């Protein structure tokens, strides 16, 4: 029993580890139903599948094509126009709205095509994690002498709020904005504190 208590205190006193463990437990409990039924966080209806997931797959093929030509043909060719998009559209500006260039997508676009839906889901879970991590950082900046449990409770409340959960299977680009917002607030708070000194 003493070993369990010491382990718990070690986890509790390390804020990043405490948040990560609580986030992982929440994800396992919250999304276990989805995964036990063999599903992923890609809704088969609505904008999530018809727009965001298909754009993610296109982006994955786009980057893999560039890398393939670079490695095997030793030439850097970045296509700018695709006649397969509508009546022909510019690739970068069209897919910028859907996350092309989003740094969170970069590790997941390299997944094989067979499991690209799992990669898309993992990217969304990473966005939820970063949302909470941003809140932890913001709270540490604005309320430095608060208990770790309060930081983690606020972070989990933000990461799993109704808007975020509805957009895990909806417009996933909004999750990126929600992840950036607390970090932006932390920078503003730091700047204001420096000006007051």
Image (spheres, helix red, strand yellow):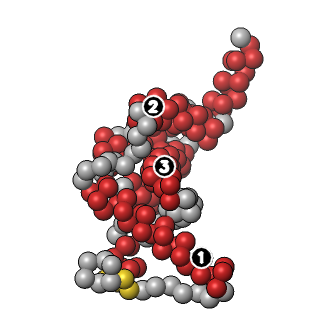
Q: Which residue matches tag 3?
A: 118
- Vertical relation: 170 (above or below) 50: above
Q: Secondary structure at mark 1?
A: helix
Q: Position of residue 140 (x, y in %)?
A: 54, 45
Q: Earlier in the sequence, mark 2 or mark 3?
A: 2
User: 67 left or right of 138?
Assistant: right
Q: Position of residue 189 (x, y in %)?
A: 47, 56
Q: CA distance from mark 2 to mark 3?
A: 14 Å
Gap between marks 3 and 1 measured at Cα: 22 Å
**Label 3: element kind:** helix
Q: Are marks 2 and 3 in contact (CB under 8 Å)?
A: no
Q: Which mark is residue 19?
A: none
Separation of residues labelled 2 and 1 (CA atoms):
35 Å
Quadrant, the C terminus: bottom right
State the residue position of label 1: 67
Name the one closer to the observer, 86 or 158.
86
Name the residue: 27% across, 57% down: 47
Which residue does the image show at 30% across and 62% down from the upper left? 51
Dot 1, how many residues are within 10 Å of its Cα: few (below 14), some (14-19), or many (20+)? some
Q: Tell me, yes or no, if residue 130 can be seen here.
A: no
Q: Residues within 10 Å of mark 2 (few under 14, many from 20)?
A: few
Q: Residue at x 72, y 21 (%)?
A: 6
Q: Earlier in the sequence, mark 2 or mark 1?
A: 2
- Residue reaching furthest right? 3
Q: Which of the 4 quarters of the picture holds residue 31?
A: top left
Q: Which residue is mark 2?
A: 36
């Amino acid at each position: 029993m003493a070993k369990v208590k010491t382990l718990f205190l070690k986890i509790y006193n390390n804020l990043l580890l405490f948040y990560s463990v609580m986030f992982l437990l929440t994800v396992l409990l919250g999304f276990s139903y989805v995964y036990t039924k063999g599903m992923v966080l890609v809704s088969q209806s609505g904008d999530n599948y018809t727009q965001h997931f298909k754009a993610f797959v296109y982006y994955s093929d786009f980057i893999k094509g560039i890398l393939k030509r670079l490695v095997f043909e030793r030439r850097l060719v970045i296509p700018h126009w695709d006649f397969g998009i509508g009546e022909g559209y510019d690739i970068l500006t069209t897919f910028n709205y859907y996350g092309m260039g989003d740094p969170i997508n970069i590790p997941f676009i390299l997944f094989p095509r067979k499991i690209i839906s799992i990669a898309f889901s993992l990217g969304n879970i990473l966005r939820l994690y970063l949302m909470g991590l941003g809140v932890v950082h913001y709270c540490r900046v604005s309320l430095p002498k608060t208990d770790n449990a309060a930081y983690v409770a606020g972070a989990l409340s933000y990461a799993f709020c109704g808007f975020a959960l509805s957009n895990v299977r909806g417009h996933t680009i909004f999750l990126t904005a929600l992840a950036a917002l607390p970090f932006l607030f932390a920078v503003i708070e730091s700047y204001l504190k420096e000006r007051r000194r």
